[in-house]
Image (cartoon, helix red, strand yellow):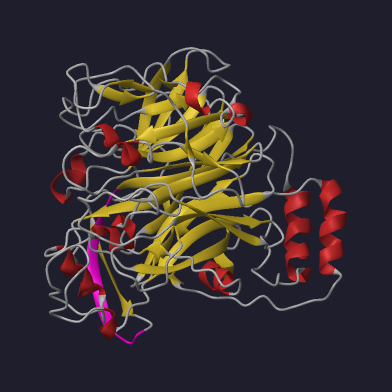
Amino acid sequence: MNHETTPGRSTLPLVAAAGLLALLFVPHSLAQSLIPGDLLVSRSTYDGIASTVTVGQALPGGGTAVADGSSLNVFNNETPDPSFGITSSILLDQYNTSSNSVDNTIDLTQAAANQGVNLSTSFPSKSELALNVSTDGSAVTFMGYVAPVNTLDVSNSNTPGHVDATNPVALTYQRAVAQLSLNGTLSITPTNAYSGNNGRSAVLAGGNYYTVGNAGNGSGTEPTNIVNNTGVQTTTPGGSANTTVVGQQQGTPGASNGFEFGYAATPADKSGKDDNFRGLTVFNNTLYVTKGSGSNGVNTVYQVGATGSVNNLAANASTTTFSILSGFNTTSAKTATTGPNLFGLFFANASTLYVADEGDGTAADAATSTWAGLEKWVNSKADGTGTWTKAYTLTSGLGLGSSYTVSGKLANGTSGSITTLTDGLRNITGVVNGSNVTLYAVTSTAGSSVTDSGADPNKLVAITDTLGDTTLAQASGESFTTLETAAYGDVLRGVALAPIPEPSTYAALMGIAALGCATIARRRRLSRV
């Protein structure tokens, strides 16, 4: 979800008031209140101990363990078990961009446990925990699993009612949409979507959740109950666990006319992977998603439904069509030789769109990639109804292809270090101030000294771009700044800016604060660079 300011309108009085109000907030019985204007960063910490995995034990996805659970070398178990993963706790850092420090950390897994509900993420699954602000600015949403911490192979498990008999992981766990309101209320809606794979992002719009993710971990052609379990899904907060798929299928699975989901068919490919979406945002009441992984479908940016239709998508799910934004890639991933590898996206205005490219995950070409970084796209018409053209890709300061090492000690007492390198960007958000836009992003990694680069400590970065620039020469003075590097045993996932309530809302918020004062515990699990 985009977070914008009205050009020429100062937000400083609101930010200052928000900072004062944050000192008065009483922590909610379920979680802590959000600090208006802070940068929210979702994070996970490896919680495993030696007994989490025992060398020689049978693994859910096949094979026997070659490493125990006491250190991040545990991910070497991906060699015998390609589906290997471990669930971990979900944390939300409220990062103050003025002081470059973490105001506080909300333990969302513990907040869920206080309700008697399991909530976790898969520690090495790099595409999870994107954050989105609701269209009404009332809450932040993300996706996780209804599974205990330190459970193996959950991210490739089946979901109830969507069991693929060929999935080597014969486990069943629900996915979850989690909603954290401004006052700290945490609500969790279990879903049966994304069987065999992971839910990645969710947004609350018009009273409905819209989610993106991937499904299928079996062999051969996925059964219908898996094909219809991926892509864009919708459900209502607190509603049925059985979600509704958004979009029309075209073609027949496995047929020569191809099979695609909501857009023109290309050569036949694996049906359940055509809509392996990663990024999601809403702008001007329109839903947009990205695809940037796998050798199926088209890796590009899609508009879901008609312009301005997000509030009606659930009601018209079966007839909704997808369209590739004019000017963006239309080449099938089956025939493309390089990129794009698209992830998060942010509209600065109707004619300026920023898209993150995470790179191809290969260390050897990270420094020379012509795709990775932050792409700026400009529309030929001010209202965004024309053709999109890529103006340039921002990479200065990212250190693409340059290795770095993070050392530290896990909570279980195990010391270690990881050497990795930056390969691109994943989730992004931004804020417009007059003629400039400041963008925040988390980096992707490659070339890890552990088996799974998704377990690498990545970075939180920021850059300010001039909206009117259309060439890289004009933007030559712009460079990314590293705000934080994740500690050893931590990973950074999603970013969003906590909404700043309208002035009329402050009376209600002050009423909450009047109930009492409390000290908000500060927790620093990120190491400053």
* Residue 418 drawn in magenta: yes
Image side of residue 247 versus residue 184, left or right = left
* Residue 434 placement (x, y as % from top left): 64, 33
The residue sitting at 33% across, 62% down in the picture is 154
Q: Position of residue 220 (x, y in %)?
A: 16, 40
- Judge whether 84 appears above or below 280 on screen: below
Residue 430 occupies which quadrant of the picture? top right
- 443 part of magenta stretch: no
| Side of 217 where 502 appears, left or right | right
Give 237 or 459, whichever is nearer the viewer.
Answer: 237
Residue 284 seen: no
Vertical placement of residue 215 versus 35, above or below: above
Residue 21 in sight here: yes
Task: Find residue 52 and report its horizontal and vertical position in percent.
Answer: 29, 80
Where's the N terminus, which quadrant? top right
Residue at 59% across, 28% down: 315
Q: Which residues are magenta?
A: 412-423
Q: Is residue 297 above or below residue 10?
A: above
